[in-house]
């Protein structure tokens, strides 16, 4: 394959991939904004333990467990205790069921 064909092939792949990558960045920003608006970031961060576990730690622990989205969404809305130590997670009544599921899916997508 000539250099010009390799170059064209690389450009084609980049042109295909770039919009996909750019779509992920706003989605991440939107999810962080939702987490901030719903006060999740008062106790959690993406990759560092604060009062509660890091979202990435939650994703790693919960990966592949049955009904995880529904369970996490329930914890987001109703709170939980004893899952990550002695500090309970308070309920968050400002989060709708749909938002809780969206947040749970996003948290589980973090690696």
Image: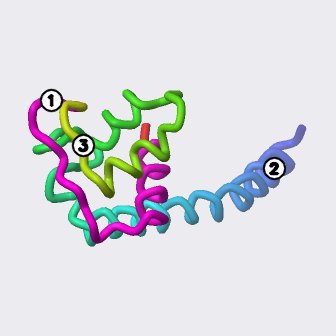
Q: CA distance from mark 3 to mark 2?
A: 51 Å
Q: Does residue 39 lie above or below 43 as drawn?
A: below
Where in the figure is residue 16, as x and y percent of width and height? 74, 58
* The one of 34 and 93 positioned closer to us in this rendering: 93
The magenta stretch is 84-108
Q: Residues within 10 Å of mark 2 (few under 14, many from 20)?
A: few
Provide the secondary structure element on which disc 2 rests. Answer: helix
Q: CA distance from mark 1 to mark 3?
A: 11 Å
In the displayed structure, does residue 74 sit left or right of residue 25? left
* The one of 27 and 95 positioned closer to us in this rendering: 95
The reply to whether the C-beta atoms of the residues labelled 2 and 1 are less than 8 Å apart is no
Q: Residue furthest right?
A: 1
Provide the secondary structure element on which disc 1 rests. Answer: loop
Q: Earlier in the sequence, mark 1 or mark 3?
A: 3
Q: Which residue is depicted at the point 47% across and 30% down?
A: 63
Quadrant (top left/top right/bottom left/bottom right) for the C terminus: top left
Q: Which label number is shown at residue 9?
A: 2
Query: On the image, numbered disc 3 is attached to which residue?
Result: 80
Q: CA distance from mark 2 to mark 1?
A: 52 Å
In the displayed structure, does residue 103 sit left or right of residue 19? left
Q: Does residue 33 lie above or below 47 as drawn?
A: below
Viewer-nearest of labels 2 and 1? 1
Q: Residues within 10 Å of mark 1 (few under 14, many from 20)?
A: few
Locate residue 56: give its quadrant.
Answer: top left
Q: Which label number is shown at residue 7?
A: none
Viewer-nearest of labels 3 and 2? 3
Q: Earlier in the sequence, mark 3 or mark 2?
A: 2
Query: On the image, numbered disc 1 is attached to which residue?
Result: 85
Viewer-nearest of labels 1 and 3? 3
Quadrant (top left/top right/bottom left/bottom right) for the N terminus: top right
């Amino acid at each position: 394959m000539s250099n010009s064909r390799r170059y064209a092939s690389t450009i084609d792949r980049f042109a295909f991939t770039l919009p996909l990558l750019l779509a992920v960045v706003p989605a991440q920003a939107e999810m962080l904004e939702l987490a901030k608006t719903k006060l999740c970031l008062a106790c959690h961060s993406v990759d560092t333990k604060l009062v509660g576990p890091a979202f990435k730690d939650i994703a790693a622990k919960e990966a592949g467990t049955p009904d995880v989205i529904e369970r996490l969404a329930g914890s987001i809305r109703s709170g939980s205790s004893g899952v990550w130590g002695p500090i309970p997670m308070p309920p968050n009544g400002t989060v709708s069921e749909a938002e809780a599921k969206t947040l749970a899916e996003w948290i589980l997508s973090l690696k």
